[in-house]
Structure formats: structure tokens, C-alpha cells
Image (cartoon, helix red, strand yellow):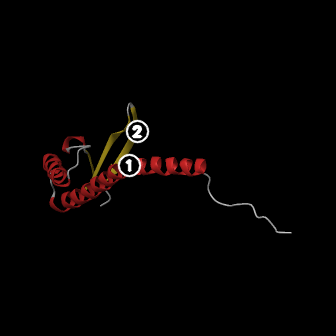
Amino acid sequence: MMNVRKQQGLSLSSLLVWAIILTVSAIFSMKLVPVYLEHSVIEKNLTSIAKDANAGNLDINQIRMSFSKYAQIDNIKSINGQDIIIDRDGGRVNLSAKYTSKIPLIANISLLIDFDAISNP
């Protein structure tokens, strides 16, 4: 007698399910990655400006103008220089910004992500 083995592999329905899962995850990552990259650029710029402010005693308007210039160069659309919160702790300047990014997904479905960017001098 021949030993009949059960066939192994994916059926068409399970292949379609996996294709849908991979497509949805690819769409999410294509929408989310640019927002998180922009957040990391914002934090990098805040840190750079805070170091400059600590070294050169910049006033509030110069700090805001400096961030606006960085934002224009790096194509930052989420915040501008007026959204920066400036705290002076002794002789040290700490910069932060709280903002929200709205990411449209499909039709009237959107993701809303809250960010809190802080300088780390």
C-alpha cells in the first residue's frame, strides 16, 4: 500500500487574506513613516537650536526665527517657530513643542497622532 500524504501549502483564500494583510500594513507604513521622520527632524532641530542658544545667549525672537529657518530648509509643515515653548532654567535653554499630525487613510478615516518634541542639549 502507498502512503498518501496530505498536501501542504496555501489555499487561494489564505493567500488572499495574507495579501490583504500585507497591503494594509504597507499602506500604514507608507503613511506613518514620513510623520515619524519629520518628528525626528524637529527634535534634532530643537536640540541644535538649544545648543546654539546656550552658547550664544539668543533671545526668544531669534530662537523662533532660527527654528523657522530650519523648518523651511527641512520642509517641516507640522509646526512653526511660534509653536515652540521656550523655558530658561538658570543659564540653560530648553525647547519643546507639542503638536498633532492628522494622517488621512481612506475616505473619511484618519489617524491622529500627538507628538511631544523636546530638545536634549
The first of marks 1 and 2 along the sequence is 1
In the image, residue 37 lies at what x, y percent? 32, 55
Tell me if residue 91 can be seen.
Answer: no
- Image spot of residue 16 (x, y percent): 54, 48
Query: Could you say which is closer to the camera, residue 14 or residue 30?
Result: 14
Q: From the viewer's perspective, is residue 43 above or below residue 83?
A: below
| Point 39% across, 41% down: residue | 113
Q: Please, which residue is most extreme toward the right here? A: 1
Residue at 30% across, 48% down: 96
Could you tell me residue 76's position as x and y percent? 23, 48
Q: Name the residue type under label 1.
A: Leu
Residue drawn where x is 79% and y is 64% of the image: 4
In the rendered image, which residue does mark 1 sit on?
Answer: 32
Kindly check if marks 1 and 2 are in contact, taking CB atoms under 8 A apart as contact.
yes
Q: Secondary structure at mark 1?
A: helix
Residue behind mark 2: 111
Q: Quadrant of the N terminus?
A: bottom right
Q: CA distance from mark 1 to mark 2?
A: 9 Å
Question: Viewed as shown, does residue 23 lie left or right of 47?
Answer: right
Is disc 2 surrounded by few (<14), some (14 to 19) or many (20+) residues within 10 Å? few
Dot 1 crowding, Cα within 10 Å, few <14, some 14–19, many 20+: some
Task: Please give the label number shown on residue 116.
Answer: none
Tell me the quadrant of the picture where the C terminus can be found: bottom left
Q: Is residue 97 left or right of residue 20?
A: left
